[in-house]
Amino acid sequence: MGALLDGFATALTVVNLGWCLVGVTLGTAIGILPGIGPALTIALLLPVTAHLDPTGAFIMFAGLYYGAMYGSSTTSILLNTPGETGSIITAIEGNLMARQGRGAAALATAAIGSFVAGTIGTVLLTVLAPLVVKLALKFGPAEYFALMVVAFTTVSGLLGTSRLRGMISLFLGLAIGLVGTDALTGQARFTLGILQLLDGIDITVVAVGLFAVGEALYVASRPELRSAQVIPIKGSLWMTKEEWARSWKPWVRGSFLGFPFGALPAGGTEIPTFLSYFLEKKMSKRPEEFGKGAIEGVAGPEAANNSAVAGVLVPLLTLGLPTSATAAILLAAFQQYGLQPGPLLFTSNSALVWGLIASLYLGNIALLLLNLPLVGMWVRLLAIPTPLLYGGILVFATLGVYSYNQSVFDLGLLFIFGIVGYLMRRFDFPVAPAIIGMILGPLAEQNFRRALSITQGDYTVFFTHPISATLLAIAALIIVAPFLLRLRQRRLASS
Amino acid sequence: MNATTLRKLATAVVLSAGLTTASGALAVDNLRIIAPANPGGGWDQTARAMQEVMQSAGIVKSATVENVGGAGGTIGLAQLADKEKGKPNVLMVNGLVMVGAILTNQSAVTLEQTTPIARLTGEYEVVVVPASSDIQNLSQLVEKLKADTGAVAWGGGSAGGTDHILAGLIAQAAGADATKINYVPFSGGGEALAAILGGHVTAGISGLGEWIGQIEAGELRALAISSPERLEGVDIPTLKEQGVDVELANWRAVVAAPGISDAQKQELAAAVDAMVKSDGWKKVLSDKGWMDLYMPGDAFAKYLADENARVSAILKTLGLVS
């Protein structure tokens, strides 16, 4: 605790607070641009920050990381255009809320949820880091595979009105995920002899294509949407009492769900958002509202992805283990300052580590202070005439994807997926399952094959490892339980 | 070629390159450095470090970095051989990984269609086991490998990459059947490290810099390093001194476009030589923890050809290239 207070002393200088604000502002701006993520931004900023002292630089990076996550949810909610994969789920309910005139409430629940989750996540990081990391290391390929199976079962909550269409969308995503060099054998799959496809198709390109470009094309194709009146803001600009009541539990649940996933070496920020959405739908008293703009579906996943961000720092700070692109860049930043990341960092550079943790708390507060007042301004984005707004989205989507890899090939892919996204909307196929399939498919496959490779082909590994067996049992329960419940109800009714 | 001849050759080339610098004015005005990878990785960092040092030391008037990423660098390579052909002001960063990628991706363009300039930096690989492992030294690991090659699960980076190549070379040199090695690729050193620390694989291979922290903290036991001799300040025995006759450096180098004249090649080589000798470059090396493996001119061209032969042989054995 004393160390943390010292950390605050390090972080709480006027100059450092200034860097924190710069980071949050920059991060929010970047998060809003589809395609440009926090990893790329920090990479580009590294040379600039080389002249800063390490504490100042890390405080800025922390603000940037949180800002980017939040900025991305803003566009998800308002424009159905996620800037990061972690906020794809937010787009589903959040955009529906915006269309009903509750965009401001959705933005507010996302901002406050991010704050709550960021704070809970940072507290967990402060107290639990050494414990969590031990648990995270118990996850080998077999355990990851079982975890992916659990994540797959939650797709059922996102299939939309028609199971068949939802499944087709999921399998489309799985197929896209297969393109590229097979990670385990180095052989090319479905690359059609095209060199650029060897690295696979970037999830950002697909997500921006299916969501942003698809949405823009769809709006353009519909005369009634093109001329749509500006959606009036219904009720108070802020969250109503009821919305508060419906939000706070998902915030907390999402926070506790996201953190351990961030801490897992192959966890990521996306999977906890799927799980959170599913969980909230199951726990809601009004599950029928999901798919029509349920605030729980924004509050939970938003909290989950922000808390995962804090979780990512657990393996980075305790083991020197970078588990995401952003963490890898942060690691490079550590090295730039001559710090040896790894298990000794906490002891050898404790002032800096605690300064970084303290700056996470500050980054969170700065984020809230910056974004809550801006909610009113952001919703006014929707007042821009639709053709101009979507024209702008197309420009930003194109810019964002191009700046990601500076590849014209990616632009071609972007518009191909844009057309696919348009067709999916036109024929009422949900888009989210495709993205989930693309994220989970390769992870599930690789870990399944790794597990079998390690055991030299022994399939029982999934059932003999206790964590893996438990997770598979949970997955089985999620699938079977609804049937059993229905059976019991029928029996009760008949007797 | 033995090490002494190599060194002599290198010295000769360095001297001649140095003479060129002294005599001619700097003809490379606007140098373009292609990093055949996306921003952030080792090749990109090398290109950006070169840019900064060359500009601030006044070796070139201006230098720009262009990222042409993808497919293990073969997309950048294709661009160098095609669009940049004959251009005297283009350098491209490459490395051992590209040698492998050209083979596994069946790239139409190979490094023979470039003009080799110099090897710059490199890193040696370490073989580790988790601290909790009952394997205490390399010979115990080799014993295990010989008894049942498949039972040793190696964790490391991508399939066909440096880590995989070293696993294959070790098995071969140890007298085990390299076609049967059980190499489990992970997407990056971080994930591989987690699998090793968690005891999910038997042993792991990665660049020394990536794992030195865990080794010093006693969480990983380093069994061997792939350098020719022990490194200063690093208490890890080499593979060679433990009877496994393998050395491997994960090197990074620069090449120029094909179709340039000898004089143009000398100019680029002189610029690179001046950069390597500058204080700025020395600072970069120490800041980033890169090892100086500078090898210019013909010695490098020969080295490149040798590495190509060695890598393609082992990748064939490993079944990655038919």
Image: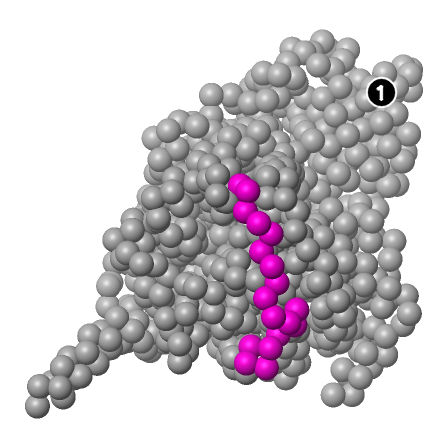
> Is B253 situated above or below A72?
above
Query: From this viewpoint, is residue B249 visible?
Result: no
| Magenta residues, dominant SS class | loop
Closer to the camera in the image, B50 or A7: A7
Residue A466 location (% of width, % of height): 33, 78
Which residue, as the protein is rendered here, is positioned at the far bottom?
A495
Is residue A447 shown left or right of residue B132? left
Is residue A132 shown left or right of residue A349? left
* Residue found 48% across the figure and 43% down from its top: A224
* Residue found 80% across the figure and 65% down from its top: A20
Query: From this viewpoint, is residue A109 visible?
Result: yes
**Which image quarter is the N terminus of chain A in?**
bottom right
Q: Which chain is mark 1 on?
A: B
Which residue lies under the disc numbered 1? B29
* Residue found 60% across the figure and 77% down from its top: A240
Closer to the camera in the image, A303 or A233: A233
Residue B242 location (% of width, % of height): 52, 54
Q: Which residues are magenta?
A: A226-243
Label 1: which secondary element: loop
Residue A405 location (% of width, % of height): 60, 38
The 10 Å Cα crowd at callout 1, few under 14, some 14 to 19, many 20 or more, is few
> Is A126 situated above or below A360?
below
**Which image quarter is the C terminus of chain A in?**
bottom left
Is A233 inside the magenta-drawn segment? Answer: yes
Question: Residue B30 sits in which quadrant?
Answer: top right
